[in-house]
Image: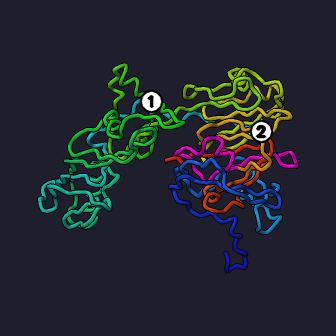
Amino acid sequence: MADQGVAQPPRWLRVHQPDLALPQLGLPDPYRHGFHRGGPVSRPLTQLGAAGAILITLAACQNTDAPPLARGNYERGAPIVTRTATLPYPPPLPPLQISRDLPPPPTRDARRLSVGSILEVEVAGVEALSSKEARVGADGCMFMPFLGRIRAAGRTPLELGRDLERALNERGYLRAAQVNVNLIKEEGQVYVLGQVGRPGVYALGVGRELRLSQALAMAGGIRSTPGLKPDATAIRLVREVGGKRRTYRISFPEIALRGRLEADVELQSGDVVYVPSQQELFVFGSVNQAGGFFLEEGSRLGVDEVLALAGGFGEKADQDGLLLVRRNQTGIATYQIPSEPIQRSEILLTSGDTLIVPARGLRRVFVLGAVRSQGGIPLDEPDLTVSKALALAGGLNRIAAGNSVLLIRRGPDGKKHTYPVRVADVVRGEPELDPVLEPGDIIFVPEGFF
């Protein structure tokens, strides 16, 4: 863009990749409208986990008229925001895309070939064109006499046979080639991720099957981590079926406790096994029993039902100011809950949602998402910043995206606006990027997904 005469963005608008490991981070004091700098916070944040320099795009209508946050000794008056959003009402929840059916068992002809697969290729009646042992190389190709390197990875043996027949016919070696491809050995890989002892990539092994339970054992078993409990009833298996990736839900207790062995499916190369953390629906703010409530996957509750779970409104609740923070495919979106009873009754909430009930006259901020202790924090000190609030919430957990934190604030126009806060850059020595909080602010820390 520079060659078109457009000025390069100022330094404070640029994003860079932070180090993934930032142990014992002393967070600096922030600035406030003319910017004040002080000493480090006494409570350090924990390691920042999967900190990626990705700004979250909210699934809401965007505008660029959000009031600026103070930023330090850079050009005063210029807004620091790169994404803003006013708050619409929440749209209907999408249908579940996860199948509760078991995946089809892998058959020899349906297995997708991968790097390390060893094949026997027989061209009917022409031994010179056949191969007793052809290996799929690191580039996903195999070598065939006269044909050279042929793409094999991602194909089934049957599909590869048809490809070879077509190549032999088109190049004039045969008129009506007949090719049979047999998978002799498989050295594929599966991926085991999420709430396990040792997430990573595991070999299928040569000439042996690998069951779901065996893969989990190889990965150190299903484990809890600080602030995160595994949901063994909702293990995800992502597999390519018919050229499309499908996601299946498998309950490990059904296998281990009830002996449902058919659910202990055989894995095939390229499978992804993901053990999620338990999903809760959170209610914070002016309610009688704030906190998280576990819901069965797929359960959906009305706003009034959720408020009943939380013991109803508190004495100072702003019943017309309810907010919904919802995760979506691009990150999060923030919505206003309608105050009109009929409209409110049409809103459904599910696990992963956070309902915030503001309190009239109370000075409080909320910290949500991938932190060790979600909830409200009293705004007792005049210069409480995003980084300090995160420290008071116990710090980021191990799967937090530390450079994708969002600050949600009501502006002078009465609308809610969102501001990206690059916390990883703050702790690397840029305190001017650490905004001072105001009553009612919401801090959301997204997860760095696998």
Q: Residue at the spot x=32%, y=62% of the render? A: 139
The answer to whether one can see residue 222 in this image is yes
Q: Return the residue nearer the eye: 125 or 431.
A: 431
Q: Which residues are magenta?
A: 386-415
Kindly indicate the quadrant of the structure image that contains residue 106. top left
Disc 1 target residue: 232
| Residue 277 image offset from top left, x and y in percent | 51, 35
Q: Residue at the spot x=76%, y=63% of the render? A: 72
Alpha-carbon neighbours of circle 2 within 10 Å: few (<14), some, or many (≥20)?
A: some
Say what amino acid the circle numbered 2 marks: Arg
Q: Return the residue nearer the eye: 135 or 126.
A: 135
Q: Is residue 153 left or right of residue 387?
A: left
Disc 2 target residue: 364
Q: Is residue 338 left or right of residue 301?
A: right
Secondary structure beneath dot 1 equals helix
Q: Residue at the spot x=66%, y=55% of the render? A: 40
Secondary structure beneath dot 2 equals strand
Alpha-carbon neighbours of circle 1 within 10 Å: few (<14), some, or many (≥20)?
A: many
| Residue 345 image offset from top left, x and y in percent | 75, 25
